[in-house]
Amino acid sequence: MGVESGAGPAPTRRVSKVGGVAAQEFSLAASIGGVRGVVESVLPYTVFSLAYALTKDLKTSIVAALIPVVVLVIWRLIARETLSQAISGALVIVLGAYLASRTHSAVNFFLPNIVKNAGFAVGYTVSILVRWPLIGVVVGPVTGEMFAWRRDRARLTAYQWATWLWVGLFVVRLAVQVPLYLADNVTLLGTLNGTILGIPLFALTIWLSWLVLKPVPLAKTEAQRTAEATERTAAATERIAEIVEDTGATKP
């Protein structure tokens, strides 16, 4: 949450607010990968499942799935964008391709993604229990509140609830993926990964997270508190000076 700049020695930028959440180019979706990051993670699975459904050839399907991975990484290189999201997704895809090739089982292409969702579910849950909810860890620096929200009960609670929503996302994915994996249903597993379990579920979780965080004011950092105190002191001093001048106390 921003503080209006004043005449004090430590002015800060004015930051507009929308329902308690800074509107200064802040996007919860962008801070955790964005829709594009979801596309990068689900598109190869969609391509793999379609290719396997059409050809029933594991090698062809693996090559088909790796093509969008390479294209998306090159796209980010050309645009000079960060590669962390693309590379992390690419590693999961490549590992899946390796497992499927080594075991000669197409369904194992999805195993690393299933393990990843399980790991995220556990990691997000642990972060809540130790009072370091990961949504707060990721979003706090973006909003400018850094980790001051840990000293603000309302904001901490909001981040905990928002993080629980993401635990729910991973659990829903696992509830669908694990039975289909065990049933060796490659086509349906890939189709659902690329549709319902991808952007729609991601978008719903983003929206619900926004609803949880929106009404709760941002926590103030120590620097912001100091700046506000300085501004209030300066305003009070100026007001006292005006009162003294109005009463003629400055005249001999």
Image (cartoon, helix red, strand yellow):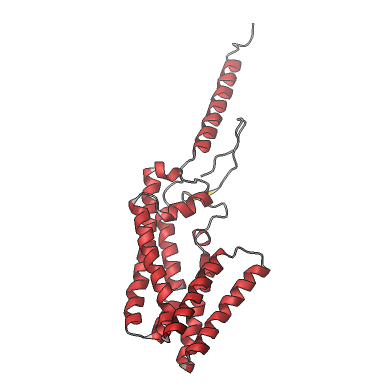
Residue 87, x across and y down, in percent: 55, 68
Q: Does residue 180 appear in the picture of this structure? A: yes
Q: Quadrant of the C terminus?
A: top right
**Above-or-below relation of 126 to 226:** below
Q: Which residue is more in the foreground, 140 or 88? A: 88
**Above-or-below relation of 8 to 30:** above
Q: Residue furthest right?
A: 78
Q: Residue furthest front?
A: 102
Residue 108, x across and y down, in percent: 41, 81
Residue 25, x across and y down, in percent: 57, 55
Q: Residue furthest top?
A: 252
- The residue at 48%/53% (across/down) is 139
- The residue at 40%/76% (across/down) is 111
- The residue at 35%/80% (across/down) is 181
Q: Does residue 197 appear in the picture of this structure? A: no
**Above-or-below relation of 240 to 203:** above
Residue 198, x across and y down, in percent: 45, 73
Q: Which residue is more in the foreground, 174 or 155? A: 174
Tag count: 0
Q: Which residue is more in the foreground, 158 or 237? A: 158
**Above-or-below relation of 136 to 118:** above
Q: Which residue is more in the foreground, 179 or 197? A: 179
- The residue at 35%/65% (across/down) is 168
